[in-house]
Image (cartoon, helix red, strand yellow):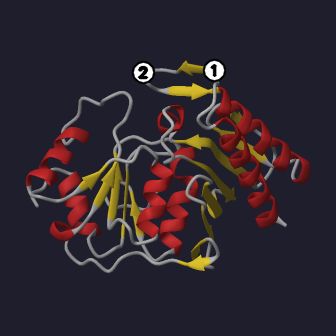
Amino acid sequence: MLKQTLLKAIEAGAAELTRFFNGTFVISNKEGVNNLVTEADHAAEKAIFEVIQKDYPDHAILSEETGEIAQDSSYKWIIDPIDGTVNFANGIPLCCVSIGIEQDGEMVMGAVYNPFLNELFFAQKGFGATLNDKRIQVSEQPALINSCLVTGFPYTYLDSPNGPLQVFEKLIRKGVPVRRLGSAAIDLCWVAAGRFDGFYEHKLQAWDSAAGFLIVKEAGGTVTDFKGKPYSPYQPGIIASNGKIHNELVNVVNGGEL
């Protein structure tokens, strides 16, 4: 039942993305430059809420646009109605709906759906990860220098050592290809599918990574914070990889040499 509701909710949100995509819609700006929210974000969120609250009216919800809807429940749905809003607003089909389900503080199920590429990623704790119902696994790349990586940049830069630009420069000066797609949820899923060997980002919110980090783990990957400790979506920094390059990537992100 939980999985069925999750899939219904993510399809309802994706239907709104498809309805608005490349059309005319209202765009506004949140904190920071180009931190957009669109009419489609709100429509997708509303559609997702309706599905969840019909089946599980007592479950808690944390969503990017509405914030937290607290309930006395062991379950929490963590929702990004459009991950990659800037892409969406510019007609770039690298955007998705992301929904994770947390039970007693542990992520137990997650789905990420990009309707424009027809890619539905799903994972349940202990049961592996799938792309369109086919099992996926992380890559086997053993060396960071030969890896293909992906990252993102925060809307507000943190004046701290080893910030986003410094780490990016260090990697690309060594010839390591680092892509920037504009959707952390897709980045994580593409690590899970073996398209990227690793992902790092300095500043994410829970809704950006809740589903994706479980999908990486269930595909055999490793996900930690910047210090290499177990990852929580409620702290900002994330490193996800195939596991084989993980220690090297943690070292570089923390100021070490490649």
In front of the other: 54 or 37: 37
- Residue 139 rendering spot, x and y as whole percentages: 36, 76
Dot label at residue 32: 2
In the picture, the quarter occupied by the C terminus is: bottom left
Which of 208 and 37 lies nearest the eye of the viewer? Answer: 37
x and y, in percent, of residue 203 in the image = 39, 40
* Cα distance between the residues tagged 1 and 2: 18 Å
Where does the image place residue 94, in percent across and percent down from the top left?
Answer: 49, 48
Residue at 21% over, 51% down: 254
Q: Are marks 1 and 2 in contact (CB under 8 Å)?
A: no
97 over 101 or under it: above or below:
above
Which x, y percent locates residue 160?
A: 23, 34
Query: Which residue is drawn at the image coordinates 49% and 70% (left, top)?
Result: 217
Residue beneath the point at 16% across and 54% down: 171
Q: Quadrant of the N terminus?
A: bottom right
Residue mark closest to the camera, 1 vs 2: 1
Q: Earlier in the sequence, mark 1 or mark 2?
A: 1
Q: Residue at x 77, y 36 (%)?
A: 46
Question: For the residue carrying disc 1, how many other residues have a C-alpha within 10 Å: few (<14), some (14-19), or many (20+)?
Answer: few
Side (left or right) of 192 relative to 175: right
From the image, tell me which residue sits under label 1.
26
Tell me which corner region of the image, top left, top right, bottom left or bottom right, holds residue 202: top left
Q: Secondary structure at mark 1?
A: loop
Determine whether, in the image, residue 91 is placed left or right of residue 181.
Answer: right
Q: Amino acid at mark 1?
A: Val
The answer to whether residue 252 of the structure is visible from this angle is: yes
Q: Quadrant of residue 75?
A: bottom right
